[in-house]
Image (cartoon, coloured by chain):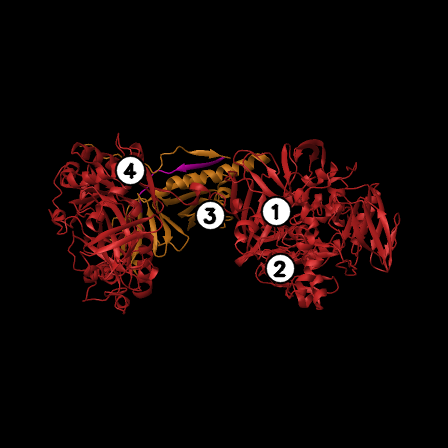
Chain colours: A orange, B red
Amino acid sequence: MPDLIAKPALGHAPLTLAGTTLTEEPQARITAIAPFPGQTDAVARALGMAFPAPGQVVESGGRSLVWAGRDIAFLIGDAPTVALAASVTDQSDAWVTLALRGPQAVAALARLVSLDLRRVQAGQCFRTGLNHMPLVLIVEDADRFRLMTFRSMAQTAWHEVQDALEKVAARAALTA
Amino acid sequence: MRIDSKGRIDRSRPLTFVFDGTSYAGFKGDTLASALMANNVRVVGRSFKYHRPRGILTAGSEEPNALVEVLGPSNQTPNTRATMQELFEGLVARSQNRWPSLGLDLLEVNDLAAPFLSAGFYYKTFMWPRRLWEGLYEPLIRRAAGLGRLSGKHDEGTYEKAWAHCDLLVIGAGPAGLMAALTAARAGVDVILCDESSEPGGRLLSDEGAIDGLPAADWVAGVLAEMASLPNLRLMTRTTVTGAYDDGTFGALERVGLHRRPRPNLPRECFWRIVAKRSILAAGALERAIAFENNDRPGVMMASALSTYLNRYGVVPGKRIALFANTDSARNTARSLMAAGVEVAAIIDPREDAAEEPGTTVHRGAVVARARGRMGLREITIRKGASETRLSVDCLGVSGGWNPTLHLTCHMNGRPRWSADLAAFVPNDGAIPGMLVAGAANGSFSTHGCLAAGAEAARASLAALGMAAPMAALPQAEDAPYAIAPLWQVPTKKRAWLDFANDVTTKDVALSAQEGFTSVEHMKRYTTQGMAPDQGKNSNVAALAVLADATGRGIPETGTTTFRPPFAPVSIAAMGAGGRGAGFAPQRFLTSDRASRDRHAPMIEAGLWYRPSYFPKPGETTWRESCDREVMMVRSSVGVTDVSTLGKIDIQGPDAGRFLDFVYTNTFSTLPVGRVRYGLMLREDGHVLDDGTCARLGETHWLMTTTTAAAGLVMRHLDFVHQAFCADWQVRFTSVTEGWAQFAVAGPRARDLITSALGRAPGLPFMGCSDVTVQGIAGRLFRISFSGEEGYEIAVPTRYGEALFRDLIARAETMGGGPYGMEALNVLRIEKGFITHAEIHGRTTACDIGMEKMVSAKKDCIGKAAAARPGMTGPEREQLVGLKPLTDSPITAGAHLFAQGAELTRENSAGYVTSVGYSPLLKSHLALAFLKNGRARHGETIRLVDRLRDIDVLCSVTGPVFHDPEGEKLRA
């Protein structure tokens, strides 16, 4: 019997406008870790990683632990191999990850996200909204971002980021 | 008329535009208003009520008269202020509120009927006969009144919404704003400087002043050059700050593409939400008019606007101009005009001590009593004491003083304060948290005063941001004192206009006072003063001064009406940018979406999800044919449907079972691993919140299923219960809805299909669950049913969903089965009497739906106490029943139930229908309904009436389960 074929959320080719590129990132292993009340330190010790404070990303050994809400973080990379005093769920298929990288990334995000992104830096993340969609925004650099939203909303998310980029590019073309 | 060598227009770039079908020439840098003026077009619009010919009054966003429709490929934008519409090649504009044309407007008959059309006329005139109001009077009034017209089509133009953040927002780029922004930006903070004009500078571009011995415009150019080198300063031109809101948030409207030919993807407008730690309002001041007889004639305009048209656009509206002003600011206008070679016939200055003016005659202590010239000013009458003289002029510049543009300071309930010295309202400190007001907006009218106030406001703002700013030398500029003799109206028995936009005269205000509407808020609503697109910017203070006069009160006692956002009109299209059509909400697509659409399944929206309604087969012409076939397919062989939209909440922790016992009415902690139980959840008020199954995957691991509609609601409820009542319990829940694609497989051959797909028999008892390997992929299998047949739900990680769906359907089709949609799913569950949110709609209790036995007596749960209150149970409540029509006729959800013979009144309604469907199995329409004391009334005949759809059918009352009431098929 043949194995089932895995499909990406979108399968879109990268889109570059005004020097800024929108890509659909390959699906990574995402594990949601929600320590039971009072167990955050124990979980951090067992993981060998600090549990991130709100808005922080902790990197260690090729894995990142991304703060994803109250008492919950997403481990991106290999799943934990030890038992944790936490709820552990595989979220790899639940999220689509887009990347927006380039000089107009912040300008495009200003059309979609209400946050102040003037001085963001690597190691920061935000749990916010992409218009009406849930968003985990991970800062790679001042003009490089990863955007995680619900997989079922991937088409709308792509469309809205593309739309914002197109408008930003049309404005940029006026002064170019 | 153009004046050579004047203005900031680019004469090397001529443009053509069309107004009312006639082609005209203008230049890059013109506004529509200045270009019309250059082409000697005097009448540009008709007034709101009396349809009087009107000309351009101002040069800014406050313009009440020159409102036009701008026509584009995708738009017909009404009420565009010609003073704000920049010219571009091919611009097409049209005058509005006239029929058939601007020159001949038949509704000008209203002007002759003016004695009958005073303030409040329609409250008095159209009272009788009453029935004519809706059919005759109101349509007539609506047709006669009003401004521009909408196209009636969708606005398919591109609009944008965006956010911006800064340390300091400076509103207005005149002398005060430029100085403030420059001072702050030099200190290194992030500054946003907004100005509603295309070019920063404010009055410095309009008046021929000097700064540091240079023309003011040169100083502006120098400042802008320095600003361009400061990366922390963001200059936003063509951006009107429209509202001040909580926490330093401001609304602002940017005209991005309105001043150029449309380009793909270029927004027409952008609605900004600017969040600033501090703000400085430097919005300047608006010149106000003086009311005198026929002061609305085309050619009567604001004195300061004359300066703007001359110095920014190189255009004057007449050859022989007079000025009527009670301050010295109009003297600059006179000097500029004379220097440009325009004849200034006279200056009429009501101040007895007014100075002479070389080059023209000053009529001291005099007023303009009236204007003449219906289609354009011809003559004014100058009155001094008892004597009147006439003067031929084709333009009159009027200045009744200046009103600080303080509107934003009132957006959070701030009230301005009356300054007797300035004869104007000035803002109070602290009206908007974090905002300082500088320059003319704060009543400081000299250029020096503005520059100094701007620099000082910047230093104070920097201090509040924790930054020190060195004192910089202020540039030298005029610092003339402001001398005004207040004059609001020149007495007349005829009409003298206050509010040009809404045709409100001094007589209307006096009438309002006479009829008892003496409060300024009442006067506003009775006369409609200040309710037009200009929101009273031109008339507000004068109107309340006239009201104060009429009531014998002072102006401070009379007070102002409330200035509310927006400061200037904002198009709904900009505020709702991106939200038209499918942009209204995110779309959620199933993994089976492509496969369903490949089979031409029409999609219906379920919340944000798109689910297949039915799967038409060749030859099927109606949805009912497909639905009936799919129902019979499930009942006879096997059907597959995507149920991934149901909420899935993963619950883990040593206290998970205890927690589930607390949120569900029934007990879960006793459920063995590998088993599933149906559960009911109540709200705290005792009504049903949601229902669904919950599977025990491990000793401390559970998977809860919610309805599609309540997925978010239940997640929120669980969070609330945990945080509020048992925060220390060792349990966490995580939504995994998005992580799994799940398909229901139902029918007598469901087991065969699962066996085929897994390569082994499922081996699950009814309400069992287990981990399975599905063609090499780790998945989950549940034996549950929402159809009444033997049913399974099989789940795999989302990425494999499409492949599994296609695989299951292909296998089903070899067994005489196939996919089924929402319509069939609904009929199957109605036949089986299963509830959805049509039944648990928020007002039903466990008892109402016949599930009171599911509320465990052995334990407490959320909502249990409230559900036991009197009135929550018992025969007086409407209880879930089934209905079957006695004849073969359709029945409808939403219909009400009446006892036979009862009068069809609201009080006699004995219940209502929640769900209906046609059962191809029982060959009858079936309904689920709520009926008073329904469980005791099985077998009765009841009358079903739907007055919206004209349905009146007798039905027999039954139990809600029509198909397999013993559940033998489920357990087979």
Q: Which is more N-terminal, label 1 or label 2?
A: 1
Foreground of the two, A110 or B837: B837
- Residue A12: x %, y % from top left: 38, 34
Q: Residue B721, how many percent across, how many down? A: 31, 62
User: CA–CA distance between discs 2 and 3?
Assistant: 44 Å
**Residue B775 image label:** none
Q: Which residue is mark 3?
A: A113
As for residue A21 lying within the magenta part, the answer is yes
Q: Which stretch is magenta?
A: A19-30
Seen in the picture, residue A151 relative to B684 is either above or below; the reply is above
Callout 2, which amino acid? Tyr
Q: Quadrant of residue B738 in the image?
A: top left
Q: Label 3 is placed on what type of residue? A: Val
Q: What is the number of the mark on residue B623? A: 4
Q: Secondary structure at mark 3?
A: loop
Say which of B771 and B891 sits in front.
B891
Q: Which residue: 53% across, 47% down?
A: B572
- Residue B606 located left or right of residue B659: right
Residues behind callouts 2 and 1 on a single chain: yes
Chain of the residue that carries numbered disc 1 in the rendered image: B
Q: Mark 1 sits on what residue? A: B144
Task: Give the Cα separation between the discs numbered 1 and 4.
Answer: 48 Å
Q: Nearer the viewer, mark 2 or mark 1?
A: 1
The chain letter under disc 2 is: B
Tags 1 and 3 in contact by the CB under 8 Å rule?
A: no
Q: Which residue is mark 2?
A: B526
Residue B216 can be seen, yes or no: no
In the image, farthest residue toward the bottom: B870
